[in-house]
């Protein structure tokens, strides 16, 4: 079987610098070629995804990792906007958040999140979670939705 070296563009929407660094470290040690782009709040996320503001020439991500507890526009509203947009709705969105509240989980899935993962507090467990996201979305799910031009 021929192995393809696909490049994956990931958008991490996260306001906690420590979690950003952990995700970056886990993905840098990846066997999958990837680019991790990071925005720190919901307004930046929507600008990035809509190619507006400071993000006019950025690539559309193949995968979004979204925290729910964001400043300016919270992650629930970002998810709602992504999944209600014709040009964004096919991008897989993985909720990666500290909340384990049933209401947040149900709301996220009702807004068509592709996956909901509660961030572990332990460093090694956090690294395992990011690796499992990588393994699933970039190894097991061989075909991600195509990017629109």
Image: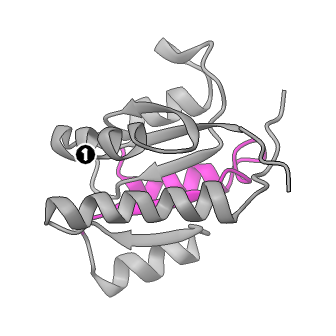
Does residue 82 belong to the magenta stretch?
yes
Residue 43: percent from left, percent from top: 41, 33
Can I make out residue 9 in this image?
yes
Q: Is residue 107 above or below residue 91?
A: below
Does residue 104 belong to the magenta stretch?
no
Number of numbered discs on residues = 1
Can I make out residue 71 in this image?
no
Residue 36: percent from left, percent from top: 46, 33
Residue nearest the viewer, comparing 73 with 126: 126
Q: Is residue 36 above or below residue 77?
A: above
Q: Residues within 10 Å of mark 1 (few under 14, many from 20)?
A: some
Residue nearest the viewer, comparing 60 with 48: 60
Q: Is residue 85 above or below residue 106?
A: above
Which quadrant would residue 67 be assigned to in this image?
bottom left
The N terminus sits in image quarter = bottom right
Residue 1 is left or right of residue 124, and the answer is right
The C terminus sits in image quarter = top right
In this view, the residue farthest toward the bottom is 102
Residue at image location 51% in from the left, 27% down from the top? 47
Q: Which residue is mark 1?
A: 22
Residue at image location 20% in from the left, 62% down from the top? 124
Q: Is residue 67 above or below residue 141?
A: above
Residue 50: percent from left, percent from top: 62, 29
Residue 55: percent from left, percent from top: 53, 17
Which quadrant would residue 12 be assigned to in this image?
top left
Residue at image location 29% in from the left, 48% down from the top? 70
Residue 28 is left or right of residue 1, and the answer is left
Q: Magenta stretch? A: 73-98
Which quadrant would residue 32 be assigned to in this image?
top right
Q: Secondary structure at mark 1?
A: helix
């Amino acid at each position: 079987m021929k192995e393809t070296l696909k490049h994956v563009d990931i958008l991490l929407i996260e306001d906690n610098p420590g979690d950003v660094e952990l995700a970056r470290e886990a993905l840098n040690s990846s066997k999958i070629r990837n680019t991790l782009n990071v925005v720190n709040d919901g307004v930046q996320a929507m600008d990035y995804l809509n190619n507006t503001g400071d993000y006019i020439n950025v690539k559309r991500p193949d995968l979004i990792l979204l925290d729910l507890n964001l400043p300016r526009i919270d992650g629930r509203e970002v998810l709602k906007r992504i999944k209600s947009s014709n040009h964004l709705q096919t991008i897989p969105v993985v909720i990666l958040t500290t909340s384990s509240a049933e209401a947040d989980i149900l709301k996220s899935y009702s807004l068509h999140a592709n996956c909901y993962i509660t961030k572990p507090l332990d460093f090694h467990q956090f690294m395992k979670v990011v690796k499992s996201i990588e393994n699933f979305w970039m190894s097991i799910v061989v075909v991600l939705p195509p990017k629109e031009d």
